[in-house]
Amino acid sequence: MIVLSTGPVLAAAIAPIAGDSSHAIAARANANAPVLPAGFPAKLDADLAWVGSDFQKQSEYICQLDADDLIEVKAAVEQYKSLDQDGDLVEPQTFPLPTLGPELAALGREVHYGKGFVVIRGIDPASYSVEDLTVVYLGVQSYIAEQRGRQDKRGNMLVHIVADNSTKQAAEHHRHSNQSITFHNEEAGDVVSWLTRSTAAAGGKCIIASSYTVYNVLAATRPEVIRTLARSDWPFALPHFHCRPVIFYQDSKLVTNFGRAALLGNAAHPRPEHLPALTHRQIEALDAIEAIAKATQIEIQTQAGDMHFINNLAILHRREGFVDGEAATEKRHLVRMRLRSAEHGWSIPKELTHEWDEAFNKGGVKHWHLEPMPSFFFPLRRQPN
């Protein structure tokens, strides 16, 4: 956990946004003024509040599977295949990991209550078919968070993040661009996870930062920015127009949920002109989040076979720009999912429940595409074969 008053890392974080803002100084000068929104704490004292330099060794956040673990995973795949079930039904009871399973369950608790992220490393994608590799991903994942959410209106359960310049719109979409992107959260899901099938020839690091740390820096230096973030007048345009806060505080937990594309638009999703624009204070607040997150981030050099799990409610993530190579093994390909745990899931603010319901309710259609599909794809049938 961090101490706000010391250290060059946090000094660098504060510098871009503290400045000598007259309204910040005025807010502090009046001791009777409510500098933070009602109910918001002066400091979040939790393991989720960290800076990248807190982690001196990769073993502090990477779970390296050993030979015995890999044998156990292989056996679980064969056990599951012998049941002759659809792949999306995999769960701990049908994907038994007697030794590794309890360790994965502990990592699930770490994602929800500890530092908020973990990488599971050691799976070799080349040693599995695409179908079996997906079963491995779902099986391991089921020990961390067992509920799986749809990620779009089409009902896609697996989102393939690959570079795609086939059209101008695809190349400009953050999912298919090879450019760096800013810090954000996914629209829904307590936990966001991804399996790396292959990595780029250069670049493409996973970069994360603690929103708890961002909050603590702002609460100590610019509390009026916290008030701005907690206001319910942020005009989100995606996935539909709605106004709500960027941050929430309930059940003694800070929940952060935003993305710049939904608030400012981008080349792939131009913001409709009839929608309200962000105010100067709102843009300043977004810039403050980005500055502090970049100053306190941790960069993770991803390897093929890595499975990332991050707390989508408390951890911000972004991607470094990358360059794909010619070989298939040098083209970046991630498979992303949105997850929730019945046991460990956080209570969701009412302003976000619509997106959570759309993702996790049992009634909607679900598509499990093992490979990237064109956006216009639809099955030429209404019922399963």
Image (cartoon, rainbow, N blue to C red):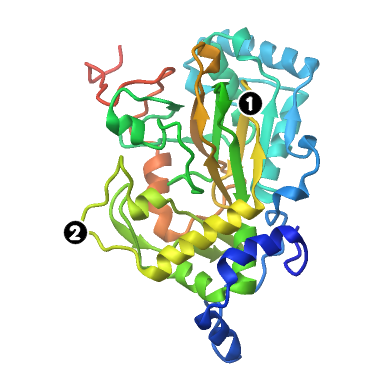
| On screen, residue 9 above or below 88 | below
Query: Is 75 or 151 nearer to us in this picture?
Result: 151
Q: Relative to 259, does residue 385 appear above or below in the rendering?
A: above
Could you tell me residue 146's position as x and y percent?
Answer: 56, 34
Image coordinates for residue 239, horizontal then vertical, percent: 32, 47
Labelled disc at residue 25:
none
Query: In screen coordinates, is 237 left or right of 25?
Result: left
- Rendered image quadrant of residue 380: top left
Q: Which residue does the numbered mark 1 point to in the structure image?
A: 306
Q: Residue at x 61, y 49 (%)?
A: 209
The Cα atoms of the two marked residues, 2 and 1, are separated by 43 Å
Label 1: how many residues lie within 10 Å, few (<14), some (14-19) or many (20+)? Answer: many
Side of 179 relative to 234 (left or right): right
User: Which three-letter amino acid code belongs to the residue tagged 1?
Assistant: Asp
| Comes first in the chain, label 2 or label 1 | 2
Out of 359 and 212, give the one closest to the viewer.
212
| Horizontal and vertical percent position of residue 70 | 73, 16
In the displayed structure, would residue 138 be above or below residue 67? Answer: below
The residue furthest left is: 274
Above/below status of 22 relative to 143:
below
Of 372 and 248, which appears nearest the observer?
Answer: 372
The quarter of the rendered structure image containing the N terminus is bottom right
Nearer the observer, 5 or 243: 5
- Residue type highlighted by circle 2: His
Report the residue marked by disc 2: 274
